[in-house]
Every structure is written in C-alpha cells, then in structure tokens.
Amino acid sequence: MDSAPVVPKNDPSLLFTNAGMNQFKPIFLGAQEGLKSDGKVWKRAVDTQRCIRVSGKHNDLEEVGHDTYHHTLFEMLGNWSFGDYFKEQAIEWAWELLVDEWGLDPDRLYATVFEGDDSDDLPADDESAKLWREKTTIDQGHILKFDKKDNFWEMGETGPCGPCSEVHVDLRSDEERKQKPGAELVNMDDPRVMEIWNLVFIQFNRQDDGSLVKLPAQHVDTGMGFERICAVLQNKTSNYDTDVFQPIIQKIAGLAGKKYGETEEADIAMRVIADHIRAVSFSIMDGASPSNEGRGYVIRRILRRAIRYGWDRLDFKKPFMSELVPVLAKQFTDVFPELDGQVEYIQNVILAEEKSFLNTLGQGIELFKSMIKGKEKLSGDDAFKLHDTYGFPIDLTELMAREKGVEVDTDRFDELMKEQRKRARSAGKFSASKKSDLDWKVIKGGNSEFVGYDEFSVETSILAFAENEENKIILLEHTPFYAESGGQVADVGTISKGDQVIRVTDVQISDDGHLHYVDQLPEDLSGVWTATIDLNRRQEIEKHHSATHLMHAALRDVLGDHVAQKGSLVAPDRLRFDFSHFEAVSQDELNRIERQVNEKIQENIPLLEERSVPIDEARERGAMMLFGEKYGDKVRVITFDPDYSVELCGGTHVPATGKIGYFRFTDESSAAAGIRRVEAVTGKVADQLLRSEKEQLQKARAVLGSQKDLVSGIESLIEKNRELEKELNKMLQSRAGDSLDQILENGIDVSGVKLFKGKVDGADMDTLKQLGYEALEKLKTNSVIVLASEDTEQDKVYLMAAVTDDVIQKGLKAGSMVSKLGRIVGGGGGGQPNLATAGGRFPDKIEEAFKKTEELISAEI
C-alpha cells in the first residue's frame, strides 16, 4: 500500500497522520471488509507510512535532536491483517524476519507483553507470552510484562486499540551487558536498549466515555521505526549516523562551515534541523503550509524552532533551510517521488517563512535575554509579548528558557492567549458551534429552521427575542435569511406584519438558531409575520459565491494542485479569496485564470445542488473539502460540471453560471507568508467597472487627440514629458549655479574661517550635494559652506554643509555640524567630514540654523 499523506485529507479530527493505522480505521471499525483494489478485497497488506508526532499523546518534539532516536517525522514500516491472521503468525513472522532474515543476535532481543489492567477490566496477555515461548527461540527470561502505558496501544482518546507486544534490542557492548542485564533497561529510556517493533493486536474500540467495546473482527497492526532499524542493521548507535540522515547533516555542516562531531552543541543543532526539514517539507508537500492556526501553526513552530537552532548555534543569520530541500528530495526519489516534483514550491514556502521570522528573531532573542536577566522565572506577560510581537511560539520560548535554567509562567500565558482569542471572536458575535449566552424571552415554543435555499419570503412566527445595550435579536420559526458563514455575508431584509416593518441588519448563527439582528422590537411580537430577504442583494452575493468556486478551480488548474483555500469573503459587491501559493501571481497568470472563469460563465453551466450526499461518496467524487470544517455523514455538494468544480459548500449560488455575467480581478497581494490574496468582482459591479474604465479611456483619447491608437498617443506624451523634465532640470541647475555664485560672493569671517551660507530655491538634496562639491572645488581652503532649500509642497527642509580639508584639521567636521543643524529644523542627518546633509520639516527654522552655524564654528576653531 502507498503511504497516506501526513496531512489527513478526510479526517478533521486528526492533526497529522501519526501512525500507520490511520488510513485503515474504517476497516478496523467494521465500516469496510478489507482493502478494495482491482476488484478484489485484500485481507493482508504491507507499507511504509510517513508519520508526524508533535502534539497530544504521541509527542516526541522535546527529545528530537537531543537523543539519538526520536523524530518529528519518521517512516513506520507495517504489516497488516484485517480479520485474517492474528497473534501467532505475527509473533512467529516477526522473529523470522529479525533473526533468520536480518541476522540480529537473538540474545540481544527482548519481547514485552501486556500485564493486564483492572481499571479497564482487562486480563494479562498470557497468550502472547506463551507464543513467544513456544514459537520462537527467544530466551525465556527475555519475555517481560509491562502495564497499559507501555503495552496497550491506543491511537488517541478514542478509536481502535488493543494490547501490544514490543520487540526491544540491546545495543550495548558485551562487557556492559554482563554488568547489567538488558531486562533491567527495557522501557527505561536508555537509547542503547530501545524498542524497534510493536506488534499491536487491535481488538477494541475506545468510546467517548472511556469504555472499551469489542470490535467485530480482530486485526494485526505492526509498526517498525524505519530509522531505528536502519541504525541497528548499519551498526550505528545513533539514527542520525545512518545514511537516512547523513546527507542532510553533511549539507548543513557545509553551509555552516563546521564538521559534524566536533561539538555537542553544534551537533544537536544539526540533528534538530535535519529532523525538522523532513517534517516541514513533507507537510508542505501534502498540503499544510505555515500559518497561525491548526496544523499550519504546528509546521510554523517546527520550522521556527529549527531556524532558532541555526541562528544560535550555527551562526545562520540568513535563510538556509530551503537549501536542504533538494538533498531531501533526492534521497526519497524512489520512495516518495512526489517530493521531487514539488521541490521549488516547498523551497519557496520555506524561504518566505524564514525571511519573515529572521526579521524579528534577533530582536526577540535579545529581548528574551533582558527579560530573564537575574530571574528564575519568565512572566506570562513577557512570554506573550515574545509570541505576539516577535512570533515566538510558546514551546520555543520554553526551550530557550530551559537552556538558561529558567521557568515560564505558562498559566498566565494561556490566560492571555484566551483573552486574545476572545477579542478576535467578539467581532463575530457568536460562534457557529456554541450556544449563545443571551437571555431569551420566549414567545412560542418550537425550533428554528432555515428555508432560504428555496424561499426568499415566508410566513413565519417569532419564537423568542433578546436585547441588551447593543443589540436587539429575534429568533424565527422559519427563516429565509442566510446567516454569515463559510465566508458568505449574511442576508438583510425585513420582517413585517401589517404596517409594522422591522429591518434585519445582520444574521449570525448559534446552536439556538439563526439570530436576526433588527433595528427595533415591536410591542406585540405574536401572530404571523412575513420574513423577506433583499433579493437583489442576495442575487449579487450568489454571483460572487459561484464565481469563487469557478475561480478556485481555475487557480488550481493554472497555478497547481498545491493551491488550497485559506480564507474567503463573499459579499454583494466583491469577493476575496486567500490561498496557499509561494509567490505573487503574475499578470499573465491572472489573465489566464480570468479568461478561464469567463469561459465557464459563457458556457452557462447549470448548478447541480445535492443536499444529502453521503460523505464517502462525496470524497470518491473528488469534492473539495477544507480542513477545520466539521462534516457530518451527509453533506451538501455544489457542482458546476463534475469534471471542473465540485465542492462541499453551505452557501447560496446562481442556478447557472451564465447568471454571473462577467468576472474581473481587481487586486492580487500577499496575505501572509506562503498565502496570496486575490479580489474580484462580478455581475453589476463588474459591469460598472468596465463602464468606468471605458469612460476613462474615452476621456484619455479626447485629451490626447488619438481616437484609434491610444498607446502611441500615451508613448508620445511620455516622451514629450521626459524632454520637458530634462529642460526643466537644466534650468533649475542653471538657477542653482547662479544662486551658488551669488552666495560665494558674500562670505563672512567667523573665527578666522570664511563662512558662506544661503538658500537655494527649488533645489533637492542631490542638487545641494552637487553644489557643495562645486563650492569646495572653487574655494579649496579655509572655508565652510552651508546651503539650505525648502520643499513648500511637502513642508520639507534640505541642508548641506561642506568643509575644506584645512578646516577639518582644525577640528570642525561637516557630519558633526550638520547633525546639530538638522535637529534645529526638526530632523537629523550626517555624512563625511568634508560634506554632509540633513533633512527636516520646519522651513521657518532655516535662519536659526544659519545663525547656529556661526556658533558651532566659533566653538570648534
């Protein structure tokens, strides 16, 4: 079987694929009979699964790089039985592979079995112990029993689980083994006596309440760490010394100008970086980019952790991680060839993140040092500042603190994070997954139902209302109003009865139902009301939402399958769409996307809306799904041509693409590192944009007198403008030269030095500098020149001071003098001893600066 992606595509409950069994969960739970392929159902399989363990129950992050055998990303070699063979064959074949095929010394191997657990009412796994004794040649004293922590495997808080039997290997020297039996070091975190294979016998399903339910069939899930077994077979005491990691480590060492093995501090950094580049690269390859939430934030944390190690211990002050990706891809060409196909994209995503973090890393480290100086504990407020201002993930701050023997007040940090999230949520009024905290006044019993996919105006009843200082809210029995969700803004409209008209200004959703924010509450809310949405507005929203789907498909077609939605806004007057991409979208690419969307609009593709599609069927049909969205067993699928755009969506759409009218991009920009943002308009707004541009072109033609070739007219105008600018510059330079000659005719004596000062109208800073050099060339000795100019339109002042060499020898320098003059005119400056400049914003202070010049000369000469 091929490896599943490390980013689970159809399991929002799982942050990363953390075990080989993740993709086989439906089989273990009885939802599938076995693996279906080529018309057959397979009961046995083998694979190598790339896994990431960085959070939750399976979290090895802190050990990575510091010990020799833990990793964030690793390959899990597995053999599987789906209701076929069980304990006997698994144990017998494990021994055959390790001892007979690979030649491991049986005297160095230990097998552990489950000792039972009273809290779960589970007996000891005596069956496995017996099989080890009778089906293998293992030393009877090497069969050990351990508790649930070590020998009962669970994927997480819930799900398939069961007792397991682990194989450990003792890699110590013969002398060490004689002094202390390996049995005393099994499961004691000794890197030389480590687990290499886990035979899991999946028999139960852990429920939400913690109870265990027997599965319909018994399965085998074995997991062997590829990196560990390589170290064993290559006679290495460290996974990092094998050919799995050495190519990357040697590349890091070369970039750093160091040798691996010289100092432990540098070696740890190289190991951390070598490990982390694997996790980051494969995550990006499989669809997760660094971001501020979810698995994207985990990737950001891992990447920034590696960057910090490089900065502190290997003196990498410029981006370096992206340069490791080609080495990694070459290693995996024959194993996971899809990595080699995305090298450039992965490099660009990593490079963008490196540049972003390196901008603040140095400042953050220096601030951290000042924060902990003389302290034993870093405050939560300081930790939050490092996170909020400098981008330091809390686990990075904790790592740096541990290295200095300092604690971190994580409780206070967590409080501040909760407050920040609360502030971020407040603008949204209510979460779609939580009960509102409103004090409802009930008018009529019943549940709220949304009917807005089919009805735009309905007769309904008011179930309840609530109000506070800021809002008045109504809950309707039936509502056509779409509540803000999925990026689509809410409907607005009216709720009326007779001559009473209540305006609905916003609609949010909570578990209570659709919350209608209204401008007033009538005294009598009983009876039958008519709820009507603003249909024209809804139709413009629908055009933008359907166009978003067409555009999403076009983005993936033109830019690549790595494009994934990262956020959106669908409004009546525009759409905004954030997506993963490593560089600016070129104008040519935007044009191609725009053309493709408009072609689909012109095809007038009818909408296929399906409201109760089994989620497995939607997946099989390739429907676009977003991580973080919670999908039930039945989903709503929006299709515009099954071969073009199929997405899970709760929004409202046009009945056919022709209704959109026209699509036009209005902007493309960066939303975050590795995330681009496009904005576009459709329908009436796009038509208005086109009309406005046409009017501007017509006016331009009228001004230029060119009705046919507008481009030639503009080029001619630009060329004429350049010629006029040249003539103007010549005139200004001539005037400035005249001004300089006049100034040089009126010098005054100050402490035996000739001072020449004056204003040069219309001169910019470059012109003043040029005049300064001309003055020095003319005067040569015993002179100081100070010139000023003002830009009246921008309220700016330009100053220039020049000093001849002999005056410099007397102690007066232009740079020192002009910095003091700059402060007088509201700015500052500096430069060389013989010529320097300054800028300011107080033109009325020029004469005061000239007067100060005389004082400075007298003080220095």
Image (cartoon, rainbow, N blue to C red):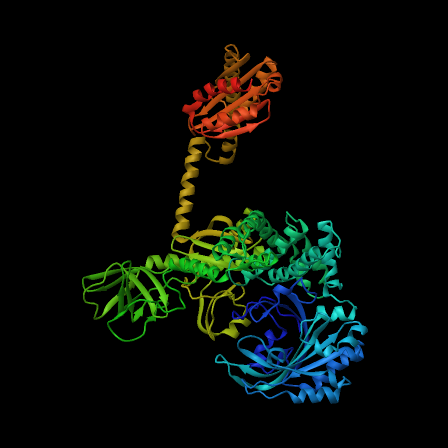
Q: In this view, does 710 lie to the left or right of 688?
A: right
Q: Against 361, is 19 above or below?
A: below
Q: Is residue 515 left or right of residue 161?
A: left
Quarter holding the N terminus is bottom right
Q: Against 503, is 737 above or below?
A: above
Q: Specify the farthest residue to the front.
A: 374
Q: Is residue 229 left or right of residue 287?
A: right
| Corner quadrant of residue 814 | top right
Q: Could you say which is closer to the camera, residue 562 or residue 120?
A: 120
Q: Is residue 549 left or right of residue 561?
A: left
What residue is drawn where x is 66% and y is 59%?
Answer: 272
| Corner quadrant of residue 275 | bottom right
Residue 658 seen by the camera:
no
Residue 557 seen by the camera:
yes
Instruction: Report the number of numbered marks.
Output: 0
Where does residue 512 sit, x and y in percent of width and height? 34, 70
Quarter holding the C terminus is top right
Q: Could you say which is closer to the camera, residue 655 or residue 578?
A: 578
Q: Against 58, is 330 above or below?
A: above
Where does residue 757 sit, x and y in percent of width and height? 50, 16
Q: Could you say which is closer to the camera, residue 808 or residue 758?
A: 808
Where does residue 205 sit, x and y in percent of width and height? 55, 82
Q: Specify the farthest residue to the top.
A: 745
Q: Against 439, is 716 above or below?
A: above
Where does residue 707 sit, x and y in percent of width and height? 45, 34
